[in-house]
Structures are given as structure tokens and as C-alpha cells.
Image (spheres, rainbow, N blue to C red):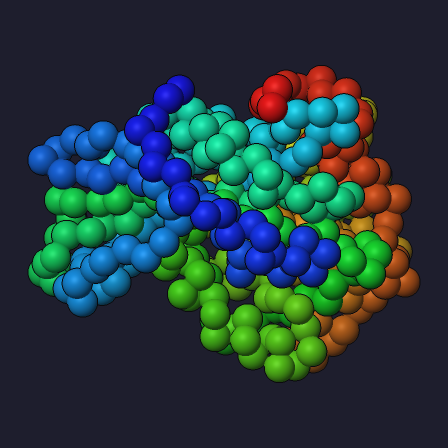
């Protein structure tokens, strides 16, 4: 797909220290931009990454009408570039957009825009093992109006930026805690949309968890505060008696692309998979009796994030001696191997660009 393109005069790439990349701070030279007005998307274009002008009355700032995605592009070890499951991310953004009354960016356009932007800023994809180009598509309401209703104007952006290896000091397990006080989502709410509001709801509890020495909150369902939902930036998997268990997609959790990749691989390997409700009591009991040997989060940022410690109601349990388990390791190696073209891609996940 070709788009009207305004290239930067001077690239900023020389200013970037590719050996010390931190997530979310560095952005590539260009961005994709498309406005919505008069009931339709206007001409898309690629322009230099830079400031945008807004008024304080911008509706998204007040009522949070916004959705986003997060995906990655990698250097293929044999040459070219791989984008991981862009179609799946495009589909999820359709669902999120529908829930937030935001106009849809059709799948082909979404994928074509990502490809065009990655191709133009190909130099920004870092080369070291474990690194990638993070791609952030998002749409938000841009009408200058502070009445509460569906906005009539939007902008869809895609920005990208190089990110370093998530695991710099090895594949170390994280610690999680349940929140005795807060919930993240309830059925019928926004939990299954990738939208700003879910993060707004999670910031205070996550901040408090950090202060107590835990890396993230393990969310329990908002009704019974009993069944596991997810981690807020990751979905969660349990390995118990040789079965991989993960909470079902029942409206409160995000349908993670990594979650889907993990489930497909596990089934492909002949591992029994159950998408079912699992209570915190079952988790605590089966860690203690030794039947649950692994817990790990799944998400685009870390791919697999082993959980070594879990705090719930005054009690802390340790999983697999606070060490990464063999299934987490195997899934991590396989998915990251597919992403960089080192392992076969039996499910056609990778969109390869010959650049
Ligand atoms: C993005 C996200 C995830 C992980 O989804 P992936 O597609 O695997 O990156 C999980 N939970 C929430 C709430 C998220 O926003």
C-alpha cells in the first residue's frame, strides 16, 4: 500500500543509543496519521513524528474515548523484517473500536499502514538479540466538545520506536499480588477492549503493589473476587498436573494475541489446554500441594513472564522455587524463535517484509 509521505529532512537516528534502549521513550522518524470527519476517514498520510496541536476541549482527554494496539517488528535473522501477527492485532482493534463507538480502521488498511511505516523507518529496527521495533497504533476522539456523547471526529495514529531486550539480566520470574480492595473490570464493562480506561483503573493498585515490592497486580474477577482474570498488561496461564489452564474470554479480560499464540502452540505440542475459570483458592492450594508447577504471564512486551511469587490475603507462596519453569522457557524460545525467523512458523503468524 502506498501513502502520501512527507519525509523528515534530517533523521534523528544518530541521536539514539541503540545499546541502552528503554521502552516507550524513543520514537522513529515518521508516524502514520489519518483523520476522521464527516462520517469518513480522510486521506491517510505518513509524516514526520512530531507535535500535534490540540485544544483543551479535546473530547478524548475528558471522557477517554480511545483505543490502542501494541505489536512488534523484528529483524529476521536471515534478512528482511518480520511483523508478528499484524492481522490479529488489526482484528482486535476492530473489536475495541466497536465497544468504544470509535470508527473502524479496516484490517487491510491497518496492516498496510503498519507495513508502510515499518518499511520507511526500517533503519530504526534494532539489531541485537531480543530487541524489536514496538508499534503503537491508536485512535482517539478529537472533537472540540466537552458534552458527553460519541465524538464526531477522530485521529488514527501509528507511532513506532526501538525497544531493548525485555530480559536484560536473564529470564527472571516476577512477583504478583492480588488486590484486596480494587477490581479492574466486570462483565459488560470495558475489560475486553484495549482502551485507556482499563489502565486508568489499574494505576493506583499497581502503584501500591510496587510500593509493597510486587511487580504487578493479579486481578480477580470483579463480582466474586474469587476467579483469576489477568494481570492487566498480560494474560495469565497456570500449569497444573500437565494441563495448561487459562481464564476464558468471558468479557472481563483482554483476548491477548500472545495468549492465543501460547494456546495454539501448546495444543500443537499435545499439551492439554483448558480455558476455564480458575479460582485463587485452587491456585493457592495447588501451589502448596505441588500440583501447580508453573505460572506465567503472556503479552507482547515480555512474550512470557514467569511468576515466581504470589501474595494473596496475607500469605505468600513460591512457585517452582522462584525459577523459570520448562514450559515457560519452551514457549518463550519457540515464540521468539518464530519472530526472528529462526524457527518454522507453522501457523503463518509472521508477516515477512523483504527489505
Ligand atoms: C495488551 C494487553 C494484554 C496482552 O495482549 P497481547 O496481545 O498478548 O500483547 C493483556 N491484557 C491487557 C489488559 C492488555 O492491554
Q: Quadrant of residue 333?
A: top right
Q: Quadrant of residue 346?
A: top right
Residue 260: image location, x then y, percent: 61, 34
Residue 316: image location, x then y, percent: 76, 73
Residue 248 as seen in the image, left or right of residue 167 = left
Q: Residue at x 14, y 38 (%)?
A: 37
Q: Residue at x 49, y 47 (%)?
A: 11
Would you place residue 40 above or below residue 284 in this image?
above
Front residue (pair 206, 250): 206
Would you place residue 338 above or below residue 196 in this image?
above
Q: Residue at x 48, y 75 (%)?
A: 204
Residue 96: image location, x then y, percent: 37, 41
Residue 157 as seen in the image, left or right of residue 65 = right
Q: Quadrant of the C terminus?
A: top right
Front residue (pair 306, 66): 66
Q: Quadrant of residue 338?
A: top right
Residue 164 as seen in the image, left or right of residue 342 = left
Residue 326: image location, x then y, percent: 88, 44
Would you place residue 205 above or below residue 73 in this image?
below
**Residue 297 showing in the rendered view:** no
Q: Residue at x 12, y 33 (%)?
A: 39
Amino acid at each position: 500500500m502506498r501513502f502520501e509521505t512527507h519525509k523528515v529532512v534530517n533523521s534523528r537516528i544518530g541521536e539514539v543509543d541503540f545499546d541502552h534502549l528503554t521502552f516507550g521513550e524513543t520514537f522513529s522518524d515518521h508516524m502514520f496519521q489519518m483523520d476522521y470527519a464527516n462520517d469518513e476517514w480522510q486521506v491517510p498520510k505518513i509524516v514526520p513524528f512530531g507535535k500535534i496541536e490540540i485544544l483543551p476541549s479535546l473530547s478524548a482527554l475528558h471522557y477517554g474515548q480511545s483505543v490502542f494496539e501494541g505489536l512488534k517488528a523484528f529483524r529476521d535473522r536471515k534478512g528482511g523484517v518480520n511483523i508478528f501477527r499484524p492481522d490479529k492485532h488489526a482484528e482486535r482493534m476492530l473489536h475495541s473500536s466497536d465497544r468504544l463507538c470509535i470508527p473502524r480502521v479496516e484490517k487491510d488498511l491497518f496492516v498496510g499502514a503498519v507495513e508502510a511505516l515499518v518499511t520507511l523507518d526500517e533503519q530504526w529496527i534494532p539489531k541485537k538479540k531480543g530487541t524489536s521495533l514496538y508499534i503503537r497504533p491508536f485512535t482517539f476522539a478529537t472533537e472540540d466538545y466537552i458534552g458527553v456523547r460519541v465524538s464526531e471526529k477522530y485521529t488514527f495514529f501509528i507511532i513506532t520506536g526501538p525497544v531493548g531486550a525485555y530480559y536484560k539480566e536473564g529470564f527472571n520470574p516476577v512477583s504478583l499480588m492480588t488486590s484486596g480492595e480494587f477490581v479492574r473490570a466486570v462483565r459488560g464493562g470495558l475489560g475486553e477492549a484495549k482502551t485507556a480506561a482499563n489502565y486508568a483503573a489499574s494505576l493506583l493498585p499497581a502503584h501500591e503493589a510496587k510500593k509493597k515490592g510486587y511487580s504487578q497486580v493479579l486481578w480477580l474477577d470483579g463480582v466474586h473476587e474469587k476467579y483469576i482474570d489477568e494481570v492487566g498488561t498480560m494474560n495469565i496461564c497456570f500449569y497444573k498436573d500437565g494441563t495448561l489452564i487459562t481464564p476464558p474470554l468471558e468479557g472481563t479480560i483482554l483476548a491477548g494475541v500472545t495468549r492465543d499464540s501460547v494456546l495454539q502452540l501448546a495444543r500443537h505440542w499435545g499439551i492439554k489446554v483448558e480455558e476455564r475459570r480458575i479460582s485463587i483458592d485452587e491456585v493457592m492450594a495447588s501451589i502448596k500441594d505441588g500440583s501447580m508447577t508453573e505460572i506465567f504471564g503472556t503479552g507482547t512486551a515480555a512474550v512470557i513472564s514467569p511468576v515466581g511469587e504470589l501474595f494473596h490475603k496475607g500469605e505468600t507462596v513460591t512457585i517452582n522455587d522462584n525459577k523459570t519453569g520448562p514450559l515457560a522457557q519452551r514457549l518463550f524460545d519457540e515464540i521468539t524463535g518464530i519472530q526472528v525467523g529462526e524457527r518454522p512458523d507453522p501457523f503463518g503468524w509472521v508477516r515477512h517484509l523483504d527489505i
